[in-house]
Amino acid sequence: MTPGVGQIFTSFAVAGYSVALGAIPFGLLLTRAAGLGDIRAIGSGNIGATNVLRTGRKGLAAATLLLDAAKAAAAVLLTQYTAGSTWMPLAAFCAVAGHCYSPALHFKGGKGLASFLGAIIAMDWRVGAAACAAWLIGAFSTRISSVGALAACVAAPAVAFMLLPQNWWPIVAATALLVLWRHDANIRRLLAGTEPRFGTK
């Protein structure tokens, strides 16, 4: 196999299993297993941890958050050990894309924040720590979940630019932009001053 063909094969393989891992809808699976029905019929209709929390089951929401992060981290780490670190950013992007546009859900899915954080942590713990800190500070200082998401999506590319290989930064930035795109309705509500705060009815 020539080097060029090998790289094409590797890129398709990494993209394929990363999308497949990211596409696992843990929020939907956990709520159905708990007898709560289809999470897509509750609240915002999202399959992520924030909407699972609207069921009142904090444990399920925490499990969804951790599993959504873990599946993206698994894609990145699997890539590191099978294809090499060069391909880790591709795995991160595809895992988050798989969550946001899951083939298992007719290319619908979640907003991707937990998967983004999991992927970034797996790529470099320093960037992941900065993104998680920004998320926590943004969310809990304003009591608005989406503010934390936006803060994380700004912090991660900025820190990646300083710490990671320069050819990784554009893909980290593209992944952050994908997550921001999935938060477009939240951004519109923030601008209108109508985005709800958690802890209030």
Image (cartoon, rainbow, N blue to C red):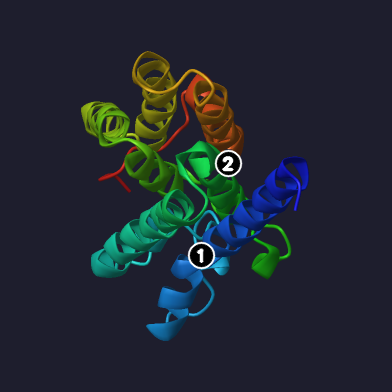
From the image, tell me which residue sits under label 1: 42
Query: Type of residue at label 1?
Result: Ile
For the point 25% across and 64% down, which residue is it? 58
Label disc, if present, on residue 25 of the rendered structure: none
Q: Secondary structure at mark 2?
A: helix
Left or right of 84 in this view: 58? left
Viewer-nearest residue: 89 or 137: 89
From the image, tell me which residue sits under label 2: 90
Query: Type of residue at label 2?
Result: Leu
The local crowd at label 2, few if under 14, some if 14 to 19, many if 20 or more residues have their Cα within 10 Å, is many
For the point 57% across and 65% down, which residue is it? 40
Q: Secondary structure at mark 1?
A: loop
Viewer-nearest residue: 96 or 189: 96
Left or right of 59 in this view: 9? right
Mark 2 or mark 1: which is in front?
2
* Image spot of residue 77 (x, y percent): 40, 53
For the point 52% across and 51% down, which residue is it? 83
The local crowd at label 1, few if under 14, some if 14 to 19, many if 20 or more residues have their Cα within 10 Å, is some
Q: Quadrant of residue 85?
A: top left
* Image spot of residue 118 (x, y percent): 37, 47
Left or right of 99 in this view: 143? left
Q: Is residue 193 above or below residue 198?
A: above
Query: Which label's residue is closer to the chain start, 2 or 1?
Result: 1
Q: Is residue 181 above or below residue 23?
A: above
* Image spot of residue 16 (x, y percent): 66, 58
For marks 2 and 1, give the CA distance. 33 Å
Could one spot residue 20 in this view of the protein?
Answer: yes
Viewer-nearest residue: 135 or 173: 173
